[in-house]
Image: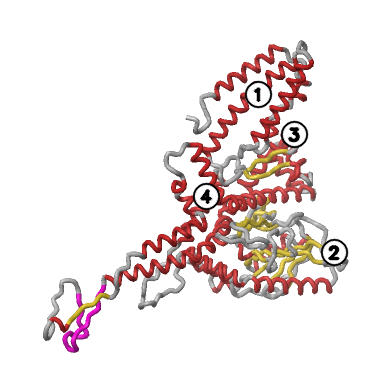
Amino acid sequence: MRLISQLPKREKLVASEERLNALKQYITEEIEDAFSSRSQLDQEWRDLMRQYEGVPKNPVRNFPIENAPNTEITLGAIACDSIYAQMIDLIYTASPLITVNATNSNFVDHAKAMQRFTNIVATQEAKIRPASENTALDDVQLGTGAYYIPWIEQIKKTKSSEVLRRGPYVFSWPIEDVIVPGGSYDDPQTLPWIGLRSYCTKSDIIKRAERNKSKGKWDISGIKPAGNKDWVRSRRETLGRTTTSSRRMSDIYEIIDLYVNFDIDGDGMDEDLLVAFDRTSRSIMFRDYNPFDTRPIEICRYQLRAHLFYGLGVMEMIKPYQEEATEIHNSRTLNMLLANCRFYVALDGTVSETTKIWPAKVQFVQGSVDNLKSFPMADTYPSSPQAQAITTSLAERRVGAGEITSPSSVIPSHTSGIATLSVLQQVNRRFTPAFDGFKIATGRAIIQCLYRYQERLLAGDKKTEEHIFEIMGSEEGRFVIDTLKDQGFDESFKVELTVSSASVNRDADRQNAIILVNLLATYYQRTLELVAIAANPQTPEPVRDVARKIANSAGEIIERTIRTFDQIRDPEAFRVDINAELDKIQGVGQEGLASLTDLLGKASQFGQPFPPTGTG
């Protein structure tokens, strides 16, 4: 079974041989310059991977003695694992995973259908969870993670090729295989070009060419095997104790898909192109207009390096402290070993050179006992554990890992519940930029899945429409199709991950929900009373005007209050527009209003047993 990237049909590219040669020269120079400018970063990534795995820098340590203790202290891995777990927990404990809200109240039904559809796409079709787990690891460890979101066809080869599934798919792309110009800024959509490298076999390339030959001409006659993989990828495989066999390497091709802006027709304006480039032979296999309206790439960074593409990760932050802790630990281990050893000075001829000693052995010597003396090989230095503890503390402070694993260290004793939650929120804000970067990139990857559906629908793909009706039904399916066919749907609807920030946790959500229920019950009850006053024909006009003003002011303050709740993304949905509602209830008698008032009174009483946290 294989996944084949399927490009939508677009207008074919027509270019002169001269401009194609200019494109080839431009790409060749840019790619080699990009790899050259990133060589030091590649070397750093290799070393950070080694430190995470706990592999010593040198296989054998012969200083200050031969075969000295040689253990790598994995401070970085300890910090990465706790932060990575927190990051994944932040995204996937919320339910539903995706929230879609309409900015216009006329499209509430569309938003509900889009939310259900988006959650199906993200969790069942695009398989966002496995991709985000790998991207999060790259993000935390190396500082940058990447998603690639194409439209794929899942093929199973039996007696005939059978399409099992068509749709968007989210891939986690290794960050060493994301190629950008040296010194690039952070937005992949505005770069002059960005490339995604992959290692393909000849059969993979042939299959890809066959599946997409209707979109443009493919020329794979000049491609050459790469011979070896990138040294960062090689380090990944070596540390994972699984490497590509030499036999298979003879059939591996280094292919780079470039999304590049280039003036291919010589009219003075750059075109947005997609080029499949074989780096080894420096030949272009395929070139055409970019089939995607948006480059299908999303990037997240753990810690920004201002105005640069690649970010700063936990391993790089903690690297100097890990090196120091490793030296202290190995020195202390060696000191313990040597402090329990002795070396001997003996008069020549007193003891044979082949003599061995062991506990409780009696050794006879010629002459007096003074002819055989023992000396300690080292003194005991009790300060080593304290020195290592100081280094570890500095490392934890640098990345904030101690605040995740031991939050009680920053919370005073005898602290009330609400104060404890406040302190925890202050602690978690340490990770807000890093977690938000991953959250936003993951959310954008899901929006890219919707873009892939939109591109198919706008291209008139009937199979895609049938698929949407199949999983959503006729009514909701029509809502989804109508929404996606609107090219500005992402401006009319807010599509985002349900989780809002690093300060969110289930206990805090539950307490906030209880507070919100009590608050809204009181607001609705008072609003209904004011509506009853304003709707009563016997109420004097000045009193009716005052009731309207009070209700409108209450609506304003309740909306501003609700906006302070992180889990509420559409506070306007909870506000009652009294002026609009008064026009609708002219036919409602006083008995109906009284029944609603009584019902809301009971709801308010139901909420009373749940006081706000910390009031007791």
Residue located beneath label 4 in the image = 86
Question: If you read the primary sequence from the N terminus, does the residue marked by circle 2 or circle 1 appear first?
Answer: 2
Question: If you read the primary sequence from the N terminus, does the residue marked by circle 3 or circle 1 appear first?
Answer: 3
Q: Which mark is residue 524?
A: 1
The N terminus, quarter of image: bottom right
The residues colored magenta run 341-357
Query: Residue at the bottom extreme?
Result: 348
Residue located beneath label 3 in the image = 105
Residue located beneath label 2 in the image = 269
Mark 2, residues whose alpha carbon is within 10 Å: few (<14), some, or many (≥20)? few
Query: Residue at the right extreme?
Result: 267
Res. 198 in view:
yes
Mark whose residue sits in front, 4 or 2: 4
Front residue of this view, candidates 262 and 301: 301
Question: If you read the primary sequence from the N terminus, does the residue marked by circle 3 or circle 4 appear first?
Answer: 4
User: Answer yes or no: do the residues labelled 4 and 2 have beta carbons within 8 Å?
Assistant: no
Say which element carries label 3. helix
Magenta segment, prevailing SS (helix, strand or loop):
loop
Q: Residue at x 53, y 38 (%)?
A: 508
